[in-house]
Image: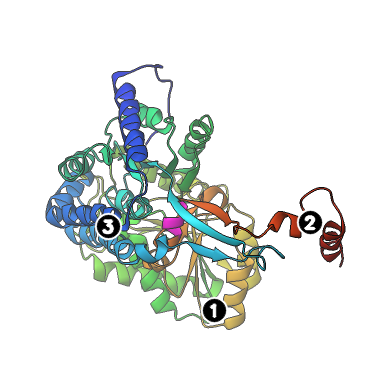
């Protein structure tokens, strides 16, 4: 989704979206309480449509990227979505139960009862990115449906085949009063983000998120933002370097680095740099003996993002920064119709280098060396808080310092990205890498309204006995003395 531009106040697309929103909101009011059975049915229909169309989904994503492995499509977008949907379906009855809370003294003793009841918010807008064009629709949708909401979905315009298929699938399984899919350009996306939803979730770039928040603020729409940032990796001197580099490169090369929680740069001991480079070359060669015609090596999604990688590399070369292209078969990338970029290590770039400014979102990996472990903590804290942070090592004090001394949306120890796969762990960012979270019960709560309910007993004159009823007297003074003290 591009940064929004000016949009006419009234368009056919915008009018249709507003009509759909009104239809869904009317349906919410007419339905009233959303039973567990209804929520399970909606989750099950979503599960079925994904299972039935799994291969079509993979083909669509491969078409959009030019080259994206079937196994990656199914293991990330399809499987990840199904696991979240099934997890929500299994647990939502428990999640829906009212939570009992203690009532203040003396109301609890007099029979007062307090609870939190989770209520659907209503209609949730879901704006998805292009890098996981199916998964970033259906993983949050699991929480949206489990919470009993309706949904309007805006897939990415950069993956048109996948977006069209999502629209076809959901139209076949749902009435537009339940779920509706809106496809179209960035201008359509801007209009979508301006709708008065009851909640909105956006996954994408931090720069675009600022526009999303501005649009949402005009209608006071609460937002969940899953963004990104430069997720750091710290390799301790105590780490198994071969194991660490293998896991880092596996994570970095997934989807050719077009992952919001991909390792964005590595901090490692100075004396281990050469060995780390050698291991990285070996690991990549084993995974991808060839690159250009290899169906298992993902291409950049389009020419725009391919050129962005080239600008990062050109900038590094202009600055005299060493770049190490890992090209196991020594292929000629000058003829490159699918916009593939070979894995490239960028050695000790300065902080002004382009690759150290914004999230890379591609198969380039800066390696920066350090001499003292504490320097890594200082470096991370001097930069915006990332969506993820990773530590490799076998030093308990260092691990504790890393986890407590830095702030990130999530973290992994001795691996990368696996925290997102845990369906009972909330997934989200902090600060410029996002706000709010989803997955598991946190997703259910994100898309629910936590309504505070207090029930006063009958017959017992609670207000009078607690001293709240005029004329104020002994009961009032007693209540005050009990509370105004150290």
Q: Return the disc, 1 or 3, that comes first in the chain's sequence.
A: 3
Query: Which residue lies at the image location 41% right of the left edge and 17% below the top edge?
Result: 9
Q: CA distance from mark 3 to mark 2?
A: 45 Å
Q: Which residues are magenta?
A: 442-447
Q: Is residue 178 left or right of residue 354?
A: left
Within 10 angstroms of label 3, few (less than 14), some, or many (20 or more) residues? few
Tell me the mark number nearer the camera, choosing from 1 and 3: 3
Q: CA distance from mark 2 to mark 1?
A: 65 Å
**Image coords of residue 289 (percent x, y):** 21, 66
Residue 37, label in figure: 3
Query: Does residue 153 appear in this view?
Result: yes
Badge 2 is on which residue? 467
Classify 457 as above or below 299.
Answer: below
In the depicted structure, whether residue 269 falls above or below residue 451: below
Q: Quadrant of residue 295?
A: bottom left
Give the prevailing secondary structure in the magenta stretch. helix
């Amino acid at each position: 989704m591009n940064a929004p531009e000016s949009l006419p106040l009234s368009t056919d697309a915008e009018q249709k979206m507003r009509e759909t929103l009104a239809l869904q909101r009317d349906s919410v009011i007419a339905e009233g309480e959303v039973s567990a059975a209804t929520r399970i049915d909606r989750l099950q229909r979503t599960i079925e449509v994904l299972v039935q169309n799994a291969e079509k989904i993979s083909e669509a994503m491969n078409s959009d990227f030019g080259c994206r492995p079937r196994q990656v499509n199914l293991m990330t977008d399809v499987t990840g979505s199904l696991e979240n949907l099934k997890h929500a379906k299994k647990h939502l009855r428990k999640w829906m139960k009212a939570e009992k809370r203690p009532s203040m003294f003396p109301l609890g003793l007099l029979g007062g009862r307090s609870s939190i009841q989770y209520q659907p918010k209503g209609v949730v807008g879901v704006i998805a990115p292009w890098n996981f064009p199916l998964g970033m629709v259906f993983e949050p949708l699991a929480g949206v449906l489990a919470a009993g909401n309706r949904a309007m979905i805006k897939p990415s315009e950069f993956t048109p085949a996948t977006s069209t298929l999502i629209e076809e699938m959901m139209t076949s399984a749902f009435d537009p009063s339940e779920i509706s899919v809106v496809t179209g350009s960035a201008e359509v996306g801007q209009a979508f983000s301006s709708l008065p939803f009851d909640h909105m979730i956006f996954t994408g770039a931090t720069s675009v998120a600022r526009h999303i928040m501005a649009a949402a603020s005009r209608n006071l729409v609460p937002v969940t933002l899953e963004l990104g940032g430069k997720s750091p990796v710290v390799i301790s001197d105590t780490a198994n370097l071969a194991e660490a580099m293998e896991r880092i490169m596996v994570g970095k090369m997934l989807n050719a680095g077009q992952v919001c929680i991909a390792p964005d740069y590595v901090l490692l001991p100075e004396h281990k740099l050469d060995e780390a480079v050698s291991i990285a070359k070996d690991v990549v060669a084993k995974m991808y003996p060839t690159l250009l015609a290899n169906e298992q090596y993902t291409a950049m999604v389009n020419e725009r993002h391919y050129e962005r990688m080239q600008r990062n590399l050109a900038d590094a070369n202009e600055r005299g920064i060493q770049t190490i292209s890992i090209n196991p078969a020594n292929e000629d990338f000058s003829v490159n119709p699918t916009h593939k970029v070979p894995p490239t290590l960028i050695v000790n770039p300065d902080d002004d280098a382009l690759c150290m400014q914004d999230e890379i979102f591609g198969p380039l990996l800066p390696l920066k060396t350090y001499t003292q472990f504490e320097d890594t903590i200082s470096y991370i804290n001097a930069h915006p808080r990332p969506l993820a942070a990773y530590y490799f090592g076998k030093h308990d004090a260092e691990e504790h310092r890393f986890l407590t001394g830095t702030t990130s949306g999530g973290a992994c120890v001795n691996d990368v990205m696996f925290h997102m796969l845990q369906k009972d762990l909330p997934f989200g960012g902090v600060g410029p890498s996002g706000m709010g979270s989803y997955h598991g019960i946190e997703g259910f709560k994100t898309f629910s309204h936590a309504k505070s309910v207090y029930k006063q007993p009958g017959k017992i004159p609670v207000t009078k006995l607690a001293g709240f009823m005029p004329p104020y007297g002994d009961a009032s003074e007693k209540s005050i003395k009990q509370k105004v003290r150290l």
